[in-house]
């Protein structure tokens, strides 16, 4: 496949930011109650609608599953590469998610789907493509792919409802439900709509994402609902189930 010229528009969308993340597991009914109270302090993402929006993420890893094992080994500094698509849009977000101890740095850029398919071409990367990339996120993704021989490893699909705090611009709350995974059909151009459930579909994952601190009103809401923080990586849980039969117990089980 011929490599098209690199998009000049993509570099204008480079985003890089530091974040903290808190994750909770709760039943869908409890999530609806939580969201009703959240509405007093936040407003829904305009893309969410009543049912939220589908998210498709394709994760790449090395043949030795470098990124998976870095997570399991508790490495303080680790990265992973993923490609994210939203339904009905022919564009892809190339994302590098890096964790340094408790802080998450996410760097991402947006490109046309055809451009991503040609550039990455299932891991066949050479130094010439890297030198052509003026976008720093894209260049880093290409270097990672070549150095570690990255290739598609697992796909995750779920339905997301997102909320933004009314007076804390850095605060975002998301509810992810109907989490499904696939470790075989890994085509970014044709995202699969099926696959085994990663989590009991009667439950969802609540994530609080913030830059500095969680406001007291949200902490009080979490305490009111009796929520406890869980450690949960969608990608690692999917790999554990697909490659190791869940031996590492990376999927939290509702009580």
Image: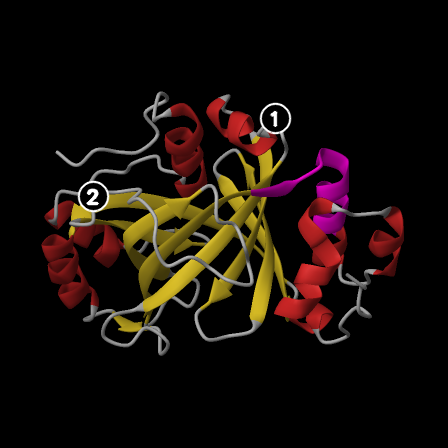
Foreground of the two, 142 or 44:
142
* Residue 151 shown in magenta: yes
In the rendered image, residue 162, in percent from the top left (x then y), is placed at: 33, 65
Query: Disc 1 marks which residue?
Result: 64
Q: Main secondary structure of the magenta part?
A: helix
Q: Secondary structure at mark 1?
A: loop
The quadrant in which residue 229 appears is: top left
Check if mark 2's residue and mark 1's residue have beta carbons within 8 Å. Answer: no
In the rendered image, residue 233, in percent from the top left (x then y), is placed at: 41, 39
Q: Would you call the spot at circle 2 few (<14 residues within 10 Å), some (14-19), or many (20 or more)?
A: some
Dot placed on the residue nearer the N-terminal end, 2 or 1: 1
Q: Is residue 51 placed above or below 69 in the rendered structure?
A: below
Q: Secondary structure at mark 2?
A: loop
Looking at the rendered image, the quarter that the C terminus falls into is: top left
Foreground of the two, 20 or 167:
20
Foreground of the two, 225 or 231:
231
Q: Would you call the spot at circle 1 few (<14 residues within 10 Å), some (14-19), or many (20 or more)?
A: few
In the rendered image, residue 174, in percent from the top left (x then y), is placed at: 32, 59
Q: Is residue 142 placed above or below 161 in the rendered structure?
A: above
Q: Is residue 76 placed above or below 37 in the rendered structure?
A: above
The quadrant in which residue 42 appears is: bottom left
Residue at 42% of width from left, 68% of height from top?
A: 169
Residue at 37% of width from left, 76% of height from top?
A: 47
Query: Disc 2 marks which residue?
Result: 200
Numbered range of the magenta stretch: 140-152
Looking at the rendered image, the quarter that the N terminus falls into is: bottom right
Residue at 31% of width from left, 61% of height from top?
A: 159
* Residue 76 shown in magenta: no
In the rendered image, residue 41, in percent from the top left (x then y), is placed at: 24, 69
Q: Is residue 132 left or right of residue 212?
A: right
Q: Is residue 229 left or right of residue 8?
A: left
Q: How many marks?
A: 2
């Amino acid at each position: 496949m011929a490599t098209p010229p690199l998009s000049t528009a993509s570099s204008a969308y480079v985003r890089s930011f530091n974040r903290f993340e808190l994750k909770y597991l709760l039943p869908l009914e409890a999530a609806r109650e939580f969201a009703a109270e959240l509405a007093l302090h936040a407003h829904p993402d305009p893309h969410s609608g009543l049912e939220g929006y589908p998210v498709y993420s394709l994760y790449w890893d090395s043949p030795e599953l470098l990124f998976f094992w870095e997570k399991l080994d508790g490495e303080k500094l680790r990265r992973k590469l993923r490609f994210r698509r939203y339904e009905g849009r022919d564009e892809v977000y190339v994302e590098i998610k890096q964790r340094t101890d408790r802080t998450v740095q996410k760097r991402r850029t947006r490109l046309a789907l055809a451009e991503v398919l040609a550039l990455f071409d299932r891991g066949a990367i050479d130094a010439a493509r890297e030198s052509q990339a003026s976008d720093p996120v894209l260049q880093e993704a290409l270097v990672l792919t070549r150095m570690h021989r990255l290739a598609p490893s697992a796909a995750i699909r779920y339905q997301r409802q997102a909320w933004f705090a009314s007076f804390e611009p850095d605060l975002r709350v998301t509810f992810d439900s109907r989490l499904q995974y696939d470790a075989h059909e890994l085509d970014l151009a044709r995202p699969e709509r099926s696959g085994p459930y990663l989590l009991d579909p009667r439950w969802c994952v609540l994530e609080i994402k913030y830059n500095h601190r969680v406001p007291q009103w949200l902490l009080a809401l979490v305490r009111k609902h009796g929520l406890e923080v869980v450690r949960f990586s969608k990608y690692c849980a999917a790999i554990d189930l697909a490659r190791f039969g869940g031996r590492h117990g990376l999927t939290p089980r509702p009580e």
